Amino acid sequence: MAQKTDSEPPSGLLELAPEVRLPTREEREAEGGFWNKLKVGLRRTHGELLERLGTGAGFRGGPVTLDAATLEFLEEVLIGADLGVETALALVERVKKNATRDQLADAGRLRKLLADEMAELLDETAPRRRLVWEHTVTLVVGVNGVGKTTSIAKLARHFQGRGQRVMLAAADTFRAAAVEQLALWGERLGVDVIRQGPGADPAAVVYDSIQAARARQVDELLIDTAGRLHTKDHLMAELGKVRRVIDREAADWQRRTILVLDATTGQNAIAQARTFSQVVPVDGVLLAKLDGTAKGGMAVAVARELELPVLFLGVGEKAEDLVEFRPREFAAALLG
Ligand SMILES: Nc1nc2c(ncn2[C@@H]2O[C@H](COP(=O)(O)OP(=O)(O)OP(=O)(O)O)[C@@H](O)[C@H]2O)c(=O)[nH]1
Ligand SMILES: [Mg+2]
């Protein structure tokens, strides 16, 4: 086996071979599902963005002039969709720089340009290496109620759909009924859930689950954790301990930490992400509850301001309500 080198990416980030084959029928069908789900997830943000854009002078038909007033208006609309001030300004700057007279002939073209620039911006901030999900232990973290447990069920379904053997670990031993909630998802999905009694040490549950995952030759072990406010130091320290157990016991696995953020909380999520990243190495974000907000632009702010890849979007309460985040498709669905 090849020796590990310093240049090797952390947490098992591997490069994907370029895609050369044509998609199968199942994959094309899944693709259709992807678009539908993405559109449902972005319906409110998309609706509000278009409605607000429609109120701007020049956006009600006829040619658009990219003067100072129009640029300022665009900035406001984007900030309203929670892209964050910095990101909105950067985006409008790009539009200004790259717009040609021809593209500005009407509002539709300007929107298309905006979508293209947004996709570019997201592409630039996305990591050059994609995460490969194979033989992976994934720690799922986040503040209370953001959607961690539901997201784990969605991820389990996602990996099952790819023919992988999944196991769940109930390391939220803190909240009453958290273990039962995960166990119920496990039953519905036909997935084993490793659990201990109430009040058990989360690190012990994680230890057990790694041994069980080995014994049962699991491909994806997903670990549910208790919600914790990023401002509570002792709870954050506990998370660090859990991650150390994973690093020690699953040294030969790919190890990930996914931070779940609630899209409805807006910019506060950025502060959460910063603090979590200081305690555990966060590999990416799952942005949940996108369907419940008109502020879906937050995905762009997360990617750009935190330089953290958005990996998945949660678009509903069911196990199927998950889509992979893809910059071009996201921008097109948002503004198209
Ligand atoms: N609409 C919508 N609701 C969601 C989504 N994800 C989760 N929820 C709902 O949000 C609520 C909280 O979800 P949980 O998965 O229990 O959140 P949690 O982070 O595990 O909560 P704690 O364990 O208490 O910290 C539930 O009612 C979920 O159904 C989503 O993508 N869209
Ligand atoms: Mg939970």
Image (spheres, grey):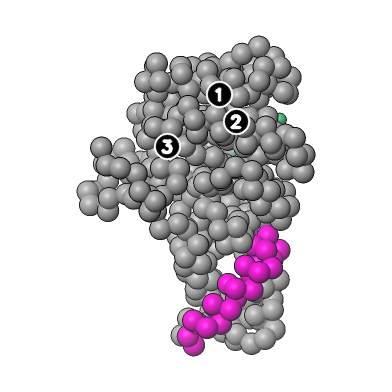
User: Which numbered tag is attached to residue 206?
Assistant: 1
Is any atom of residue 115 visible in this view?
no
Disc 2 target residue: 242
Q: Which residues are magenta?
A: 77-101
**Quadrant of res 24:** top left
Tell which of 172 and 34 is nearer to you. 172
Q: Main secondary structure of the magenta part?
A: helix
Question: In the orientation shown, which residue stands out farthest toward the right?
Answer: 232
Say whether disc 1 or disc 3 marks the residue closer to the N-terminus.
Answer: 1
Q: Residues within 10 Å of mark 1 (few under 14, many from 20)?
A: many
Beta carbon of the mark 3 residue lies under 8 A of ligand 1? no
Residue 79 magenta: yes
**Quadrant of res 141:** top right
Q: Residues within 10 Å of mark 2 (few under 14, many from 20)?
A: many
Amino acid carrying mark 1 in the image: Val
Amino acid carrying mark 2 in the image: Val
User: Is 211 on the left-hand or right-hand side of 81?
Assistant: left
Amino acid carrying mark 3 in the image: Gln
Which residue is depicted at the point 70% across and 38% down? 236
**CA separation in Å, label 1 and label 3:** 15 Å
User: Is 11 on the left-hand or right-hand side of 303?
Assistant: left
Whole-percent x, y for residue 301 in the image: 62, 60
Tell which of 194 and 252 is nearer to you. 252
Tell which of 243 and 4 is nearer to you. 4
Which residue is depicted at the point 47% across and 65% down? 124
User: Which numbered tag is attached to residue 254?
Assistant: 3
Say whether disc 2 or disc 1 marks the residue closer to the N-terminus.
Answer: 1
**CA separation in Å, label 3 and label 2:** 15 Å
Residues at discs 2 and 1 in contact (Cβ within 8 Å)? yes
Say whether disc 3 or disc 2 marks the residue closer to the N-terminus.
Answer: 2
